Image (cartoon, rainbow, N blue to C red):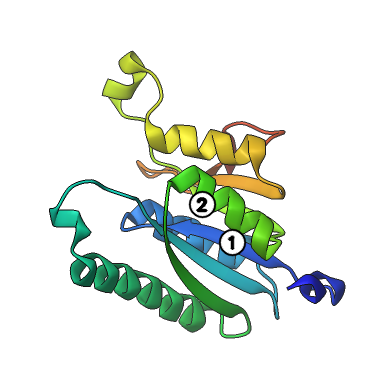
Amino acid sequence: MEGFERYGKKRVMVVVDHTSNSKHAMLWALTHVANKGDLVTLLHIVSHSTNRLSEMPSDSSSSSSFLANSLGYLCKASRPEVEVEALVIQGPKLETVLSQVKKLEASVLVVPQKKPSLFGCFCGTNSSEQLVEQCINHADCCTIGVRRQTNGMGGYLINTRWQKNFWLLA
């Protein structure tokens, strides 16, 4: 998609999963990053697993396809002027995100953030927080970690290479 940016359009890649955090990050990307004619790529990563139950391809692949398609329809309903594609890829999460950013020449990567748990405060960062930080530090494009504020505050907490825990009231 080399010519995509040449015409003033950008590819906005959003990492999605089954959590409400990813839905909020996707909607934030649609309203704050994507413009008319841009391409939003929803990237759902199915991790490798040695668990026999998770190796059943029909359940996991149909669930992943349903997730990607339903979020894609939500994008089109919210912003019909934005192109949307959904990708479901199996692999290690960080390596897959970074390779897809490079392969598809993403302009912006949006990664959902979870609210840190009280337990996490005592035990260090969790894998979700590490994924966000690693993507911010190593992706070949502008990377934004997005978390919706709760408790009646409104707005979003944004993390980038240059700004940490920036509160965006929008």
Could you say whether the residue bearing mark 1 is in a helix, strand or loop? strand
Mark 1 surroundings: few (<14), some (14-19) or many (≥20) residues within 10 A = many
Measuring from the top left, give residue 31's x and y in whole percent.
59, 66
Q: Residue at x 23, y 46 (%)?
A: 50
Tell me if 125 is positioned left or right of 103 in this view.
left
Residue 96 badge: 2
Mark 2 crowd level (few <14, some 14–19, many ≥20, 10 Å Cα): some
- Please name the residue shown 14% across and 52% down the image: 52
Q: Tag 2: residue type?
A: Thr
Q: Position of residue 130 (x, y in %)?
A: 47, 32
- First-in-chain label (2 vs 1): 1
Q: In terms of image quadrants, where is residue 38?
A: bottom right
User: Which of the 4 quarters of the picture holds residue 128?
Assistant: top left
Which amino acid is tagged 1?
Answer: Met
Q: Which residue is the extreme one toward the top? A: 122
Q: CA distance from mark 2 to mark 1?
A: 12 Å
**Residue at image mark 1:** 13
Image coords of residue 85 (percent x, y): 53, 76
